[in-house]
Structures are given as structure tokens and as C-alpha cells.
Image: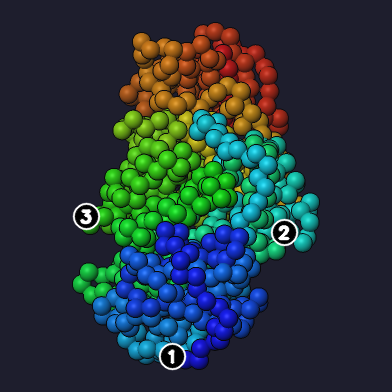
Amino acid sequence: MDRASDEGLRFDLHSGRAEVLGAEFDGAGTNFALFSEHATSVDLCLFDHEGKIETARLPLPTMEGGIWFGYLPGIAPGQVYGYRVHGPYAPEEGHRFNPYKLLLDPYAREIRGEIVWNDALHGYQVGKDDLTFDERDSAAFMPKAVVADTQFDWDVDNALKTRWQDTFIYEAHVRGLTMNHPQVPDDVRGTFAGLGSQAIIEHLKAIGVSAIELLPVHHFANDRYLVEKGLSNYWGYSTLSFFAPHARYLRTGQIREVKQAVRRFHAAGIEVILDVVFNHTAEGNELGPTLSFRGIDNASYYLLSPENPRHSFDTTGTGNTLNVSHPMVLRMILDSLRYWVQAMHVDGFRFDLASTLGRELEGFERDGSFFNALRQDPILAGVKLIAEPWDVGDGGYQVGGYRWPFREWNDKFRDDTRAFWRKDPGKLPAMSERLAGSPVQFNHSHRPATSSVNFVAAHDGFTLWDTVSFNEKHNEANGEDNRDGHDHNLSDNLGAEGETDDPNIVAARVRRARAMLATTLLSQGIPMILAGDEFGNTQNGNNNAYCQDNAISWLDWTRARPELQSTVTALSKFRAETQLSKARFAVARTDDLEFQPIARWLHPEGREMTEDDWQIDEQRCLGLNIFEGETSKVLIIINAGDDARFTLPEGEWVLRIQTASHTVECERPAAGIIEVPHQSVLALVG
């Protein structure tokens, strides 16, 4: 293997530090540090500005505790680099070292270039088994790390720390949200600069959003099998670097663009939450490429089969699983989280397939090392932590199984809400649970009533509008003959599959979409909507658009339905003004009237529901009367059935929300008996 020149470059042996991993510039030079417990040596490779030509290759001079490090004077931000790691190539022992493969620094803050798929990226000879050894240099096909300039004037940007009771989450994609927005300048669409544009922020403020939750923004790989089909990894759940933003989302390639966007969101009172993928990486199983972790120290970074460490141990369905039980892998994850909080000022994280992060020797453990590390960390315990509480392994479905301070995506809310408004029989008891914050799942272990993240649509599955427009998925564009994506959509096209000009069908879809939005915004817990659901965005029936970085996934702002957007605005305003969301779960009766929310379930006749009432499969109308101390009494009435009449409790009431009317927001006194139109939600204040 040819070696690049290292003439004139010498490590300062007195200045190197092992305690700070990655590439740290101190004003005079850069400290490089990489963990590899089983390596025999590590080469630092420097490249020209474009990352095309290797200009120097220098063995890191010192190793302590498995950390290889060295300080190079004169190396400044903008320097492009990578590593080559030497050690045993013994796949049957779990080791896959191959110094012919250039490797990305796991702690890289910026990345230049993209993967150019080539068989040389594999540590073995493709076409033969993985015990073979490949001697082709992979540098020409690899993205490289860049020493980052971390200086930024935050101008007294403070964490917002919005209370969970006041939180309203908007799940969005950097490109999907901005690529088609007519008021976002063309040159910043698809980037953080476009995300933080005035047009986007004003829209979010108008509908009452308090937090934007971004699909993965860590640098990710564009998977080879997708590229070869003319598709791309749109969602980004294939992480290659846990510190660097995805290069394509940066117009200039510099991390300051992320900081500028975060600062603008904070100035508008909007928090930023990142969807993070710490359960697996882009390298796949043992037959995947050698891009970073596999070549740095496969046996440390990944879980391997206990019977045969040649093979990956996969609990994620993606080919590999990060070895979170290893202290240095756990440290890397915690360092990443702290970096995004302290350096980038983000406000929280949603953990993809979080159950994988809690897997110990005996399976999922709610008190596992990762969760306990988060709970005791003085920085991370104070930010918003949200779990996707499942994975594909045995015992992976854990909705309600996490401890405080975690909140959890609640797919039971999605499924029961869709089924109830679809008029499935016998769904009233389940719907009452969801309105109350799903206490069966979450009212334990001192958890608050804000533990459930309630949604009817997310990036994975039908959009809200597609839920009322399609009976079947239509994923043909994904190139898998419509086999991909799940079939449990609980959807109803209301008379026509897909787009229609029939005014009656369109009106019925709007009415049901409004009812489901109201259910989400008026339930106890944390409401979350998918970007575009506030105006009826469609993916034309594609319920698995993970590979569609195009018009299928990009929001079509030109076809927005104002009647839906006004609904979300009215609902978020009502939720805030009435302080509808409670920190404690409501009970039927209590002596602690000052602090304990009270809830009463009301039959349309005005009386409290009986056990027999709950057993009637065709009962589809219900009232929830909830109040706390001296604050306003609120009455939520849901009716998925035919037009009904509802006897109000005694007292003076004012109708504030009526989803079946042209104008959702109103201010109308009500008493005695009130009309409740079919497929509608009413909200009254007393």
C-alpha cells in the first residue's frame, strides 16, 4: 500500500490528550483521538481540501486505554482527514481490521463528500465469502471527516424548556418541509437555512406548534441497493456519523448553518427535537461495507453472535446492532447527545427503536445501563427525551414500559383513534383511554399524564389525508411490487380510492380529518402531528416513502386545504387557553380538589356512563368532563356515529369548538340539550 508523504508534519508528544475524542482544534493545532481496543496501530490520513488526494499518513503516536491519539500543530479547521486502522483480520473472532479501507471518524463534526458505491468499500472480496481479504484502497469512494470550526455567537440563546403540558410537536423532514415551499428561496431549499427561513417559522407559529421534531439529521448513508434502483435514503435511518449533520442539508458544508436555524427557532419560541438512531449504523451485517465502526473495532462497537462472532447480532432488522453495553460505545452515544445539546443547542431527542438501547443479557431492561446513564446525566436529564418504544426483537414492544423522564410514542392512540372514527364497533372504551392519556399504559411508577405522545399519523405510514382517502397502500414507486410497508392501516377511503372530485366524498374526508385532528389536540398527553397533516398533504397512498426524495414525500403547499389548517390553529389555541393538558392523571373523585384533575364520562343523556353503557358496541358518542381546582371546566364530546343530541351538565356552558361547522372556532352559549353532528368533536367551557 503506497504511503502519502508526511514531510514536515510532526506530532507534539507533550500536547496530545486522550480524554477528548475526535478532532479538537485549540487555536494552534488539532488533537486527534480514536478509540479502538483491539487495534495494533492507527494511521491518521490527511487529504487536500476536496478530499481527493491523500497528502500525509502518520501513525498516531500514543495509546492509552484503547484510545489512540496525537496532537498536530498547525492543523486548523477545514482540514480533511480519515483513519486507517491496523489489527487482525479474523472474522471468526469478530475482528475485521483492514488498513486498505479509509475509515470515517465516529466523532467527526463535519463531513465532506458522499459515498460512491464500489466493491472496494468492503473489507472482503465481494463475490466470495467474508473470510477473504480485500486489498483495494477505498479512499476514493469514501466521504471524509473535516476538522470543524466550532466558534459561533449564540447571542444569549437560552434553552426554552417548554413545559410538557404546553408542548405541541410537529414531525418534519428538512427537505420534505422546504423543497416545494413557494416562499423559501430556491438556493436554500432542502437545507437547514431553508428550514430556519421566515416562511417556515411563521407557518409553525400560526398553527401553535411549540416544537419541531426532525427526522434524522445525523450524517447518513444513501444505501447501495437504493442507489442502484434510482432511489435514495430519504428518511435517513442509516446513520454513519452521530456528531456531523448530514452534509446535503448544509448549503456551505459548515455546522454553523444548524446553529443559525436553531437560534431562529428559539427566537420564535419553538424547540428543536432530533430523531436519533443509536440502535444500528449504515454498515449493515457482516456482508456490509467497511466504512467506519466495523474497520475501527468491529468486536467493540457491534453486538456479535455469541455462538459465532463472525456474524452480527441483529435486533433492529437492519443488519447490525450497536453494542451499547460497551462503556466506550455508551460514552460515544452520550457524548453525541451532550454535543448536540451543548454545542448545537437542541432541546431534546426522539430515540428510534429505543427498546434496542435497553437490551441487556436477559432482554429489554427498563433500568438498563443506557437509560440509567441518561437519567443521571445532569445535562441530558433536563432535555426532552422521547422513546419509540419498540424494536423487532423478542419482547421489543414496550409501550408504557419506560421510566420517567421518558415520554413515548403511543401507537395505541393512532390505531384506536383511526378505528373509532372509521366506526369500527366496540371502540368507545379504548377511545376513552386515549382521551384520558392512556392511563393503563402510563399511570404507574410516578409517571405524569404527559407520558403519551399522541398521534394519528407519522412519517412511517399513511398521512392523515391518505388515511381518509385510501383503503390500500400504493407503494409501487418503491420498486418492490407493493410488497413493502404494512397493511394494518385502519384507513377508509369514504367512497373512492385516492383523489376524487366528488364533493360529498371530499366533504366527508375533511370532516373525519378534522375529527381526528381534534382528538389528537384535545386528549391528555402530548399532541404530535405529521408535517402537512395540518393542510391535507398526500403521498398518494404510499405508506412507506422511506426512499422517495421527490414530489411523493415533499409537501405540496399549493394544494393546502385552509379548512384543515384553521382547525389546527383553533384547537391549539383552545388547548393553551383552557390549560387542557394536565400533569397528573385525572380521577373520578378526590378530596384533593386543588391539585387533582377530575374526570367524568358522560352518556349523551347527560348521566354518567355505566358498565352496561361501555359494553354497547354501537355506542359512538361520549362526553368527557374534566376540570382541576378553580380552572375552567371543559367538556369534550366526540361522536363517530350519526347525528346525536347531548344533554349538557348543569351550569352555563360556552361552545368553543365545533369541527363539523365551516368555522371551527366559535363562542356560543349552550345549555340543556345540544346537537352533535355525525363524525364531529365539540369542546365547551363552563
Q: Is residue 68 above or below residue 437?
A: below
Say the numbered circle drawn on residue 469.
none
Distance between mark 1 and mark 2 Cα atoms: 41 Å
Distance between mark 3 and mark 1 Cα atoms: 40 Å
Quickly name the residue at label 2.
189
Which of the 4 image quadrants contains residue 449? top left
In the rendered view, does 182 fall on the left or right side of 269? right
Residue 656: percent from the left, percent from the top? 63, 22
Residue 536: percent from the left, percent from the top? 65, 47
In the rendered view, does 580 fall on the left or right side of 573? left
In the rendered view, does 567 fall on the left or right side of 19? right
Label 1 vs label 2, nearer the camera: 1
- Does residue 172 appear in this view? yes
* Dot 3 amino acid type: Glu
Which of 649/363 is in front?
363
Residue 92: percent from the left, percent from the top? 26, 80
* Dot 2 amino acid type: Arg
Quickly name the residue at label 1.
135
Which of the 4 image quadrants contains residue 80? bottom right
Mark with earlier residue (1, 2): 1
In the rendered view, does 617 fall on the left or right side of 115? left
Q: Residue at x 68, y 39 (%)?
A: 267
Q: Residue at x 64, y 28 (%)?
A: 573
Q: Residues within 10 Å of mark 1 (few under 14, many from 20)?
A: some
